[in-house]
Image: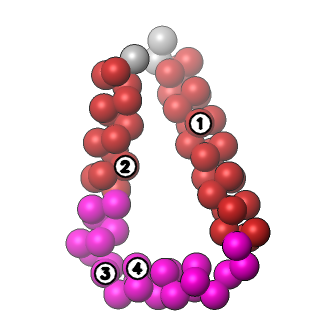
Amino acid sequence: MIKTIFLAIGLVLAAEGLVLALAPSRVEDMLAALRDMPVETRRLIGLIAVAAGTLAIWLAKSAFA
């Protein structure tokens, strides 16, 4: 279980690091777009991301179990 948590954290950090390293100006554009969105829309996007991530983890664990 702890191995999976560290793997997930490492993957998120690697992906976020790549985005910041390869397209820092696009990150600023995305942050500006997020700032202009209503709070309810941002909350919905966050919930969808959590659900998609949970589904991806569940599928990966069941496929390779």
Name which residue type carries label 1: Thr
- Kindly report the distance in space between the C-alpha atoms of the residues bearing marks 3 and 1: 27 Å
Name which residue type carries label 2: Val
Considering the image in quadrants, where does the N terminus appear? top left
| Furthest residue toward front | 39
Residue 19 in the image: state x and y as whole percent. 34, 68
Q: Which residues are magenta?
A: 16-39
Residue placed at 68% from the left, 52% from the top?
47
Q: Is residue 2 left or right of residue 29?
A: left
**Within 10 angstroms of label 4, few (less than 14), some, or many (20 or more) residues?**
few
In this figure, which residue is indicated by the disc labeled 1? 54
Residue 12: give its label: 2
**Numbered disc 1: secondary structure:** helix
Q: What is the chief secondary structure element of the magenta stretch?
A: helix
Instruction: Report if the CB atoms under discs 2 and 4 are less than 8 Å apart.
Output: no
- Kindly report the distance in space between the C-alpha atoms of the residues bearing marks 2 and 3: 17 Å
Instruction: Report if the CB atoms under discs 4 and 3 are less than 8 Å apart.
Output: yes
Residue 35 in the image: state x and y as whole percent. 58, 83
Q: Is residue 57 left or right of residue 8?
A: right
In this figure, which residue is indicated by the disc labeled 4? 27
In this figure, which residue is indicated by the disc labeled 3? 24
- Kindly report the distance in space between the C-alpha atoms of the residues bearing marks 2 and 1: 13 Å
Q: Which quadrant of the figure has residue 62?
A: top right
- Kindly report the distance in space between the C-alpha atoms of the residues bearing marks 4 and 1: 24 Å
N-terminal label among 2 and 4: 2
Residue 21 included in the magenta stretch of the image: yes
**Numbered disc 3: secondary structure:** helix
